[in-house]
Image: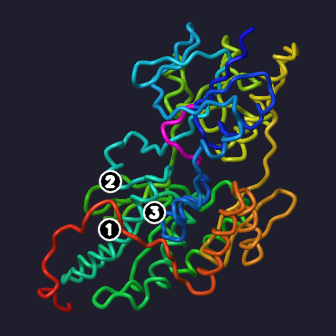
Amino acid sequence: MARHRVVIVGSGFGGLSAAQALAGADVDVTLIDRRNHHLFQPLLYQVATASLGTSEIAWPIRHILRRRSEVTTLLATVTGVDVAGKAVLLEDGSRVGYDSLILATGARHAYFGHDDWEKFAPGLKTLEDATTIRRKLLLAFEAAEREPDPDKRQALLTFVIIGAGPTGVELAGAIVELARVTLTGEFRRADPGKARVVLIEAGNKVLANFQPGLSDYTLKSLRDLGVEVILGKPVTTIDADGLVYGDTRLDAECIIWAAGVEASPAAKWLGLEPDRAGRVKVTADLSVPEHGEIFVVGDTASITMPDGKPVPGVGDAAKQGGKHAASVIRARLAGDTALKPFRYKHAGDLATIGKRAAVIDFGWIRLKGWVAWWVWGIAHIYFLIDTKNRLAVALSWLWIYLSGQRSARLITQGEAEAKAPIKEVTEA
């Protein structure tokens, strides 16, 4: 008798957790992803700001699952799902059949109908995004060193982050420290200490999901660091030279988008009507209505908690969802077809503000400041996959904490743009 075939699309927190939770089950697992690595997204901003290298927060999928002989890993792009034929469709026209399907395809940044903004304000969801932003940041300082016009030089040294959620807050603090600590004394014409870091939020508070006291502390801490925080003014225009927020024009070379996300096209693959964020509306056990063999987890799924609040799009929710989908499949194989509702347990909210402060809300306890920063660091190191990465990240953070220096400041992916020769540049 053929073994039950489980196909998992996506190797993020949800997909990898599902694959790990199926260990020992009487199933054959096929894991499909268009990238060959699992990414620890909470530290992605540290790659973008030159604190960590890519290999410190990502691991080859095949290496993680190398001891699982029942797991086949495919590097491929999924283009659709044949629901009636129970097959996942790949970009080369091939099909991968399934008995159970878990879609854990995550989300990408959303520009609220202004997709043309993406080329001017990249978001941060993948390693490619992070290295693109890192290159953009570092090249801005290099261009400023060669720019004789003081106004243009200041525009080159103006860095704007749109969106004051955890990613925006963490990016703002890290960029300030990169400019005003790490790069101090390394340039002769441009002064990194004069860099402007501007955080723009359409809402009226930073870290909107946090308790008001922690949000207020974060706002004060950002401003103490030197971040210009602008609240209650949505961005209306982004172009090659800068942006407009409210009625104000701001010239800036480097703009980063951290304001919103939308789900993968999984709903379209399944022929379903998505919610406003593009997510699949799932049933209580994370399966798709009328197709109980298909599960959707993580950022791709739309589901509410018993109190009516939506399950947040965070890594821990994806992990719990992946494990739940796997547990339902295992139960069904054992003959238990009773409905098993998903119960999300919120572990807490965390965000760091530079290298000496953070805010943490576990519900039962709230922390801020230096102690919270240490708890934040220990928690993130704990959830890294292997000992080598835990040690590497810990040593990198210790070095940055003690010296202010960041070792991942290599500019790759191309040559510098042609500018006037250095000998023609004069002090302005």
Q: Earlier in the sequence, mark 2 or mark 3?
A: 3
Q: Is residue 80 magenta?
A: no
Q: Amino acid at mark 3?
A: Ile
Query: With 239 as the anchor, is 340 left or right in this view?
Result: right
Query: With 236 as the anchor, is 6 left or right in this view?
Result: right
Question: Does 125 sit above or below residue 173?
Answer: above
Distance from disc 1 to disc 2, alpha carbons, whole Å, reads: 12 Å
Q: Position of residue 307 (x, y in %)?
A: 80, 37
- Occupied quadrant, residue 58: bottom right
Q: What residue did someone put label 3 on? A: 161
Query: With 14 as the anchor, is 177 left or right in this view?
Result: left
Q: Please, what secondary structure does the residue beneath circle 1 have?
A: loop
Q: Residue at x 56, y 8 (%)?
A: 85
Q: Which residues are magenta?
A: 32-38
Q: Amino acid at mark 2?
A: Thr
Q: Residues within 10 Å of mark 3 (few under 14, many from 20)?
A: many
Distance from disc 3 to disc 1, alpha carbons, whole Å, reads: 11 Å
Distance from disc 2 to disc 3, alpha carbons, whole Å, reads: 14 Å
Q: Amino acid at mark 1?
A: Ala
Q: What residue did someone put label 1 on? A: 252
Query: With 43 as the anchor, is 122 left or right in this view?
Result: left
- Which callout, 1 or 2, points to the residue nearer the camera? 1
Q: Residue at x 59, y 80 (%)?
A: 400
